[in-house]
Amino acid sequence: MRQTQLFTRTRKDAPKDEVSKNAQLLIRAGFIHKEMAGVYSFLPLGLRVFKKIENVIREEMNSIGGQEITLTALQDPEIWKKSGRWDDAAIDVWFKTALKAGGEIGLGTTHEEPLTSLMTEYIASYKDLPRYVYQFQTKFRNELRAKSGIMRVREFVMKDLYSFSRSEEEFRLFYESCAKAYENIFRRVGIGDRTYRTFASGGSFSKFSDEYQMLCDAGEDIVYVHEGKKIAVNKEVYVDDVLAELGITKSELKEEKAIEVGNIFPLGTRFSDVFGLNFKDESGESKPVIMGSYGIGPGRLMGAVVEALSDEKGMIWPKEIAPFAVHLVSLAGKNSDVAKEADRMYELLQESGIEVLYDDRDARAGEKFADAELIGIPTRLVVSEKTISAGGVEVAARSNGQGKLVAESDIIETLHAY
Ligand code: ATP
Ligand code: MG
């Protein structure tokens, strides 16, 4: 894509009321637009990153047998009254509104109820199980605080998967395979080294649930990390007798700030009992389906990556989720030979299937470099009078800024290795 065609541009300052680093950088680089506190729109560069994160998650969910659907945002109170969660005392972040035709309606904060109810139409026998169903769907939550940029918003897409199993054993097997898939996701988006599987309270059906917590100063949670075992526990679990069960002691744990980037949760028969989601086993006996839920917010993940992987100059995207693989910067000035050479390079990269943002703007070198650093595409290519007379193009990594001259004939091979 040519930067002269891109409708967004970078800006020096973020809105004055924007306190979080992730939103400041994303707004300044033109990735997102702030509509109001806790509500952001995604612009072309931001949407590219968002879609890539979504795709990483989708690949990992498909690889463990997930089937993708989309449920509605508008929610029928009757369904939620059955489980007792229509009440604001049960879910304190509901957005509710009135129908013109009469009656109330809710904007979905999560989807256990409608999906469990829906699945009663498709699950009757042991032959219909297990099933794993997920979606990327917009949730609405009336969060009290919205100070963490895109990490805590009032409207966001969540990947939520729900598992339907015949037995505790079958459920556990899937739960652990999802835990593995989550680890793959966090590694692939670039935060695997600082994200901890974190023991949390399991509610009424299980001792534990698991949060995935990324250590970060901007985090709103406190976790206690065991470096050696690469696990953590949250506040609920930070009590001596529970720690003893995990074979760890308080003295081995380090207190850290963290942000929850995902979680997995055993639901037992909490929802299948309410909606009568039962199946007949091999001997014809009726049993409730065992359920679990598995959430990740791709937008929160994007914010977390910015928090973790940025420096004073801007963002540093990992290759797998970068808006483009290469930022081609032309320093042609008034020299049309350089401009032609840069155009040729742009075509060569595109023909080779490399995603490239081409800075073909008529701007000073300093401005172009500062913008490239802010936007944070992992590899920068510079075409200038100097590089042409030296017989190539300059290739530099955003992560360390170190550049080297590469002959044009070697450029594609070099980029593939970056
Ligand atoms: P938190 O305690 O941080 O509010 P939660 O326990 O409400 O999170 P879940 O309801 O389990 O989180 O949601 C699953 C995932 O959705 C979270 O792990 C997170 O990635 C994402 N998420 C939750 N709330 C928000 C939000 N307000 N804005 C953006 N993403 C969110
Ligand atoms: Mg919450």
Image: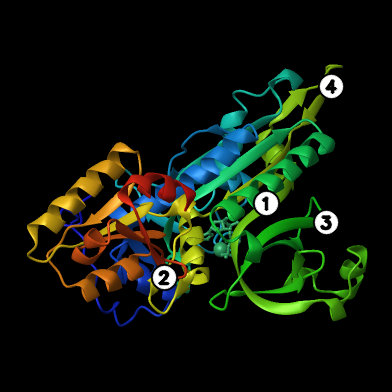
Left or right placement of residue 201 versus residue 9 in this view: right
Q: Of callouts 4 and 3, which one flags the residue occurring earlier in the amino acid sequence?
A: 3
Q: How far apart are the two marked residues, 2 and 4, measured between alpha carbons?
A: 66 Å
Q: Position of residue 96 (x, y in %)?
A: 42, 56
Single out the mark in the foreground, 1 or 2. 2
Residue 131, above or below 42: above
Ligand number 2: quarter of image: bottom right
Depth order, front residue of 147/2: 2
Single out the mark in the foreground, 2 or 3. 2
Residue wearing tag 3 = 207
Q: Position of residue 412 (x, y in %)?
A: 38, 45
Q: Of callouts 2 and 3, which one flags the residue occurring earlier in the amino acid sequence?
A: 3
Q: Secondary structure at mark 1?
A: strand
Left or right placement of residue 327 versus residue 134 in this view: left
Single out the mark in the foreground, 4 or 1. 1
Splitting the image into 4 quarters, where does residue 186 fall?
bottom right
Q: Is residue 183 visible?
A: yes
Q: Secondary structure at mark 2?
A: loop
Q: Amino acid at mark 2?
A: Gly
Q: Amino acid at mark 4?
A: Glu
Whether disc 2's CB lies below 8 Å from ligand 1 is answered no
Residue wearing tag 4 = 285
Q: How far apart are the two marked residues, 2 and 3, measured between alpha carbons?
A: 48 Å
Left or right placement of residue 351 versus residue 205 in this view: left
